[in-house]
Image (tube, grey):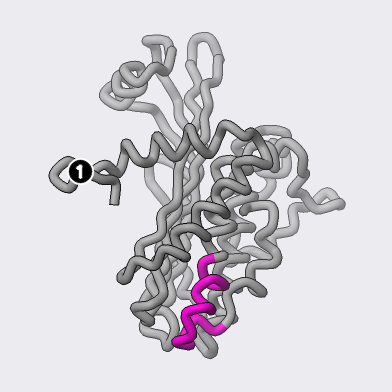
Amino acid sequence: MFIRLRSIKHLIPLVRLENPKLRFRYLLVAGFATGGAVSAYSFLKRNALWASSDKLDTCSFVCEPVTDTNTLYETNDQMRSKMELLIMRIQSEICRALESVEEGSEFKVDRWLRKEGGGGITCVIQDGHVFEKAGVNISVVHGELNQTSAQQMRARGKKMGEGKLNFFAAGISSVIHPRNPNVPSIHFNYRYFEVKEEQSGEVHWWFGGGTDLTPNFLVQDDVVHFHKTLKSVCDSHDPTYYKRFKEWCDKYFYIPHRGSSV
């Protein structure tokens, strides 16, 4: 869960051990992932992510943000700036927590730029004793929305004008593959997307994303724990969220020839 990330290093100790009970501690990585899409907006509305002085404090990040820090500070009331700072903080906390498990290894950081606007930060650790490979990546991109993408969004119910549309997108994604086959892999991605109509100035925005657990060997206790974590986070915001979002997820992952979503 995003608003509890600072305690993650205490939640994922020694997954290299074969004791099946330790899977639960590792599975709590899903705890911060599962609450992201549900919790991000309310967290951003309630919290300021800025230093108390007139300068933005970036020393805890893996590197400098994609957007210039002066711009982020000057636009600190905008959701796009709050989201970028949030995913920068989350990326750093996850990387430091995983490094504490994978003793003697550090994430390799690659900060890249996109010529059309924006860029991202890729963090990868691999070939360790605990993790075969783990990536924690963010992207912050912007530019002009092409007509094909705009038409697809309108087809999905987004009510946007026909003129020029400028977009901004910021998100975090992660895939974590442990070496131990008894420990499931975890994936999550959460993003914020906004489109601004150039003629009217109207801004359309939304959050998206999700998380999934991928076991090599299906253990019912793991499934129960994973979904209890999801439900607990959802219920803390709205008791209808879990049922509604799970139905969306089951439909998205439905495999027709298997007749199931697994």
- Where is residue 195 shown, x and y percent of the image? 48, 25
- Where is residue 147 shown, x and y percent of the image? 29, 21
In this picture, is 23 found above or below 139? below
In this picture, is 106 found above or below 159? below
Question: Would residue 72 be counted in the magenta stretch?
Answer: no
The answer to which image quadrant residue 156 occupies is: top left
Residue located beneath label 1 in the image: 259
Mark 1 surroundings within 10 Å by alpha-carbon count, few (fewer than 14), some (14 through 19), many (20 or more): few
Q: Residue at x 42, y 88 (%)?
A: 129
Q: Residue at x 57, y 46 (%)?
A: 231
Q: Which residues are magenta?
A: 14-27
Number of numbered discs overlaid on the protein picture: 1
- Where is residue 246 shown, x and y percent of the image? 44, 40
Query: Is any atom of residue 104 visible in this view?
Result: yes
In this picture, is 203 found above or below 122? above
Q: Amino acid at mark 1?
A: Gly
Query: Is any atom of residue 122 visible in this view?
Result: no
- Which residue in the rendered view is the most extreme toward the right? 53
Q: Is residue 62 left or right of residue 245?
A: right
Q: Residue at x 77, y 39 (%)?
A: 46
Q: Residue at x 80, y 53 (%)?
A: 51
Viewer-proximal residue among 112 and 16? 16
- Where is residue 60 shown, x and y percent of the image? 68, 66
Helix, strand or loop at label 1? It is loop
